[in-house]
Amino acid sequence: MQAAGIPYRVLQPADRIPVSQRLSLQAIHTNPLVLTLETEGSHWLLLGSAGTHVQAELTGSPLMPAQIDWLWWDGGSLILDLLERFQVQAGISSGSVGETVVTWFRQKQRPLYVADRSGAVSWSRRGVQTLRAQLD
């Protein structure tokens, strides 16, 4: 990027990135990158491929919101303490999800969308739509 003259910035924890009036990102952890996204009063945790050791760090982070409305991750292991502590309301996984996590969402009666079953997932103020539901 430097060679091409493209401006960039190295994110640090707590850095905010205003995307628009109604959308902002905040770096919570930088290696691997974990972001929160806030839009129209909804808080997302973009966990990606962060492992359980990073998740444990997040449970004590003052940068985390009190509640996470939506959690997105790659389908890797999740610690239940993260789900409980931040009262995760819904989850979207890009990969297969372990039975313990599926059971947690089911017992809490909270939606869990898994890409290989749901297809693409889109969210708006009006609700969630999945590609599978649109094709059926």
Image (cartoon, grey):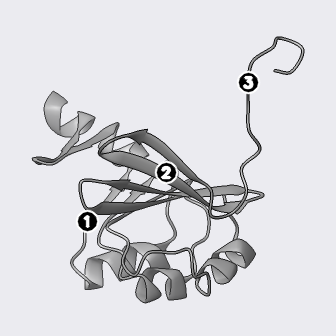
Q: Position of residue 19 (x, y in %)?
A: 44, 38
Q: Earlier in the sequence, mark 3 or mark 2?
A: 3
Q: CA distance from mark 1 to mark 3?
A: 39 Å
Q: Is residue 67 left or right of residue 12?
A: left
Residue at mark 3: 7
- Residue 22: image quadrant is top left
Q: Position of residue 39 (x, y in %)?
A: 31, 52
Q: Identify the residue at image location x=46%, y=44%.
A: 18
Q: Amino acid at mark 2?
A: Leu
Name the image quarter holding the C terminus: top left
**Which label lies toward us, 1 or 3?**
3
Residue at mark 2: 25
How many other residues sit within 10 Å of disc 2, few (<14), some (14-19) or many (≥20)? many
SS of the residue under disc 2: strand
Name the image quarter holding the N terminus: top right
**Residue 124 visible in the displayed image:** yes
Q: Position of residue 57 (x, y in %)?
A: 69, 81
